[in-house]
Image (cartoon, rainbow, N blue to C red):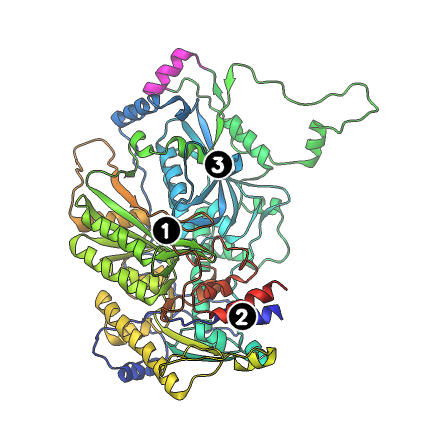
Amino acid sequence: MIHLLCLLNMISICMSYVRVIHSSISQNSMKSQLQTIDSINTESLAISVPSNGLISYIGNTTPLSDNHERWGSHSLIFKPASAAQLTITRLNLFKQWPWKKIKGKVIIKAKIGGEILLESQSSGGLFNLGSQSDQLNLQSITDIQNMFQLAAHDPRVLGVFIEIDRVASGYAKLIEIRRAMNYFRQSNKTIYGYCASGSEKEFYLSLGCDEIYIPPEGGFDLRGFSASASFFRGIFDNIGIEPQVQRIGKYKSFGDTFNRTSISEAQREVISALILEASDYWVDSVSKDLNKSRSDVLSLWSETGVRSADDLKEKGLVTGVSYVDMVEEHIRNKHRRLNVNIFQKIVSFFTGIDYGFIDNKSNEVAASYNLTDDFIQQPRRSIDHNQISLNSSASQSNKFEDPSALPAGLYLRKLKFGSRIIQGLPLKETRVGPRVAVINAVGGINTGKSGNGPTGKTLGSDSLIGLIREARRDSNIKAVVLRIDSPGGSALASDLMWRELRKLSKEKPVVASQVDVAASGGYYLSMACDQIVSEELSVTGSIGVVTSKFNAAELNKKIGLNVETISRGRYAEILSTSRAFTDEEEKYFESGAWQAYESFITKAASSRNMTVGAMNEVAQGRVWTGRQALSIGLVDQIGGLHKSIEIAIQLSNYTFNRNPSSKNTFSIPIQTLREPRSGFPFPLPGASSQLSKSSDVIKYLADEAIFISGLASLESLQLTGLSTEFSWLPSEVVYWLSTGQLPQSLLKIITEISKL
């Protein structure tokens, strides 16, 4: 009964943006145009869609144009610092405070996994008392990028060892991490990887390492990609709830969740397309990284039987089968150095001459674990023998020195202002002089201040508008990059932020950088920018409208709940769940939806310069990957943060003091504008820390297809840091609960049921 009644919390009015070109188009005209469009003609994604089971065909594999391959991801090129810059770096490191210094050569050790956020949440303070485990975890794209870029140019760092845990982010963030890993590897330093267990996402991330190891009883469970859609109409009928759903857009699937008992052909087409895009990208990436054919990679999903760790090694998917301590010992042996005297250390520090280098070619890979050898080298202790011979190694001779392992979090704290110390970085964080501003727009969109509520992060319009105005006022900020990781939310808040972005773009260029999700309200923000940059597997679009109300009169009768409403005003009770719409209320409700639809599509069409017919073909509530959106004109470029910054600089026509004749590597000056979020049980002044009120009726939210496909991150869907009050609910349910459209009376019922 709990699972049946908890579905009540999905009551919401969910409207996603739709775009066409003329503001004067009448509602009836738009309705007739939508009815005449039965399919998407710009991209034929499949020959046929199977009713269930395996998808045995591939999607559109044609290139984007004659001059581009299907996957055209932007790569970041490593440029070594000049001799002068290296000298300045060494001097800066020498002048550091004693507690900031690093002794000798180091291997940075990090853990990557779980919820990977867009921006860092750690304080990074001097008196951080976190455990070593806390210091190992890197939980934001910002921290991971900073670590790899600083380490690539830091002469003290020999390599990086990362332990890969289960990943809960979307593929767009993983692509950015792989880009940072590739940048580090271009510096001729090594990334060692270890993964106890994982699937496709973890394996994709591990391929960014030079060496990847798995334990004997672990490894990668590579089964393929799948998606499941849920439909609640039958449950609602049984418990006495009548869904009253109106939908604008053939592919708007949110209404299907409530109003159908099975998947529609339109929704099946969308989900199949997303799965095909993600799986094709994975297959092509693995094929390229391992230098294998597509058929060899696809066979991983069709072979019978469970693959052991040794099987993965035999197929060349991993470097070796070893426990983590064996990998750490291998890294120490590989980077073991001669112990040099103080004079040699000083000369080496300032000149870069490596007196301690040893060519350890005998330690190319870690030794594979062998059970028999293990018990020979370390036999069981026995009370039957007076003498015990332990095969433990004696302490190393003073002739050699092993590199120390430095936790990644500690490394970043020691280099908190690393761009002032390490020269030659691609980006340099600064608050003075000409620079590019970076603003992060993360979470569900609401009016008011940003905060961390019980259902996760919220993006407050007041907070973002404040940062936008700050960027507009500062004459030294020459361009702005807006990083968007949001499924949308309040229509009013979205429009207020859209207006401020438009005002900003009149004075300086603004580039949207889409991360995991920039759909519906997230896409609305993107349209206010001069250029839209997306990762290949970012989720965007979702341009359509759904309005819904649930009539719980029959349920109320069954459970003995009586609701008495006193109101004044013809439509004051329109959102009441205790009765159905009247004919007049239903027309009023539909009229409001079409009015919001028309307002949005007018702005959207002006942004993308598309005809009504073309826009209708790519709209209708359909979500797209970044690559698909590029091919149909919804985004302009493929890439991540660095690509967006490069475009912003080009649009600004500002030289940023680049000197073509200089041998120094140029660092782009940036400033990340932030507003503090509440991380305490109580909110910051004005911050939102509870469910949104339902006064803002119209919501622009992405469809649940982004859940089903697995391409969206928890952070972008505002589901991180759930309070215990809602942690027992499925993530899809919490997502709709966080829209704020749940009546307080039903919320109380659900809360009480959860306590039973």
Q: Which mark is residue 7?
A: 2
Residue type at mark 1 is: Pro
Task: Tell me if I can see residue 187 in this picture.
Answer: no
Q: CA distance from mark 3 to mark 2?
A: 40 Å
Task: Tell me if I can see residue 515 in this picture.
Answer: yes
Residue 346 highlighted magenta (yes or no): yes
Q: How crowded is the residue under tag 3: few (<14 C-alpha within 10 Å), some, or many (20+)? A: many
Residue 445 coordinates in the image, percent (x, y):
36, 60
Q: Which mark is residue 685?
A: 1
Q: Nearer the viewer, residue 697 or 366?
A: 697
Q: Nearer the viewer, residue 88 or 317?
A: 88
Give the residue number, with chain letter if any, for mark 3: 135
Judged by depth in the image, the label closer to the viewer, 3 or 2, is: 2
- First-in-chain label (3 vs 1): 3
Which quadrant holds the N terminus?
bottom right
Residue type at mark 3 is: Gln
Q: Main secondary structure of the magenta part?
A: helix
Residue type at mark 2 is: Leu
Which quadrant holds the C terminus?
bottom right
Q: Is residue 1 left or right of residue 404?
A: right
Q: Secondary structure at mark 1?
A: loop
- First-in-chain label (1 vs 2): 2
Residue 720 coordinates in the image, percent (x, y):
47, 54
In the image, residue 586 sits, relative to residue 162, either above or below, namely below
Residue 258 coordinates in the image, percent (x, y):
49, 75
Q: CA distance from mark 3 to mark 1?
A: 30 Å
Look at the image and give the residue range highlighted in magenta.
Answer: 340-353
